[in-house]
Image: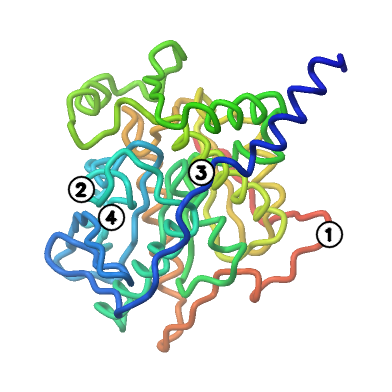
Amino acid sequence: MTGDFRILLAIAAICSGCASFPDAPTSTQIPAAVADALVSVDGARLGLTVFEARSPTAVAIAVHGMNDYAGAFALAGPYWAERGISVYAYDQRGFGRSPDFGHWAGGDALKQDLRAAIAAVSSKHPDLPVFIIGHSMGAGVILAALKDGPLDVDGAILAAPGVWGGASMPIVYRATLNLAAAFAPGKTLTGERAERQASDNIEFLRGMYHDPLVVKETRIDAVLGAVRIMGEGWDATNEAGGEILFLYGEKDEIIPLKKMKKAAARLCGAVTVKSYPESWHLLFADLGRERVLQDAADWMQSRTARRPQDKTGNLGPAVFNCPADGGNGDSEAGR
């Protein structure tokens, strides 16, 4: 390690505290799901899209990834609704139709909103099992929330989970990002030079490109915030567990495959891992999505069928004691 590189890392370590984000908002009310909004604990109205099943046997709360919004589930939501699972897809704070579009609200706020969504949907459907489905950074938020304490749900689906941050990311990346966020937090990036493909569904990608609710220019401080929450998610994989379905596409060019595979192995509890050779990062929208969507529906329905009459949350560190070396349950490759 050269002297200049040591200096860079030292400066980055000092600057890591320079880029700060808001604390979670103060709770002033009981959260609720009303019309087209999820009303969080501070009264903030987060964008909400509901895909209702005619005679629901379960409900799912869908949490989108970075720069996206509930539209990420435009193909998945109707598919699950047709199979008896009502889907509540909300826009995380700072994204889509929610307040402060394009600005990072802080990881604590995103975790608090997730718990608010669970409380609101559970209250609306007290007799039905509730699942959470997170894609990419949304899955990272779920894992980070699990690190803080159990979630009152019947299971979680983590799709292409955002676990590339914190200790799982090379230190030089973190150093550069911290420096950039400290000195130019408002500078924006488009990602066009990354030359990475998110899906083989080109029509869906074009729709995202023209959708005004999808963030196109990302502030550097927002990138740092996303990396931090994904780092929390990575850390949580060595502590959290429960009824979890872990999904990833082997053609994913956004989240490193090695990191996802290692994260899956670190989780404990009743963990089912499925990989799909022809799926990309947006595996709920890919051309071959039906196998993925059906596996997710089957998994939720199987847990609904064996669920006791009285709802009891069974996801979180309080349920399963993780061994020191992590380790999970079933592993199955999608075909």
Comparing 226 with 287, the one in front is 226
Label 4, on which residue? Answer: 90
User: What mark, if any, has residue 173 been given in the picture?
Assistant: none
Label 2, on which residue? Answer: 97
Secondary structure beneath label 4 = strand
Query: Mark 1 and mark 4: span between their CA atoms?
Result: 35 Å
- In this view, the mark in front (2 or 3): 2
The figure's colour scheme reads rainbow
Query: Mark 2 and mark 3: span between their CA atoms?
Result: 27 Å
Label 1, on which residue? Answer: 324
Q: Hey, what amino acid is under mark 4? A: Tyr
Query: Mark 2 and mark 1: span between their CA atoms?
Result: 42 Å
Q: Is residue 16 left or right of residue 65?
A: right
Examine the image and state in which quarter residue 13 appears. top right
Q: Residues within 10 Å of mark 3 (few under 14, many from 20)?
A: many
Examine the image and state in which quarter residue 206 appears. top left
Secondary structure beneath label 1 = loop
User: What mark, if any, has residue 247 been given in the picture?
Assistant: 3
Comparing 249 with 110, the one in front is 110
Query: Mark 4 and mark 3: span between their CA atoms?
Result: 21 Å
* Label 4 vs 2, first from the N-terminus: 4
Q: Residues within 10 Å of mark 1 (few under 14, many from 20)?
A: few
Query: Mark 4 and mark 2: span between their CA atoms?
Result: 9 Å
At horizontal 26% and vertical 47% (from top left) the residue drawn is 70
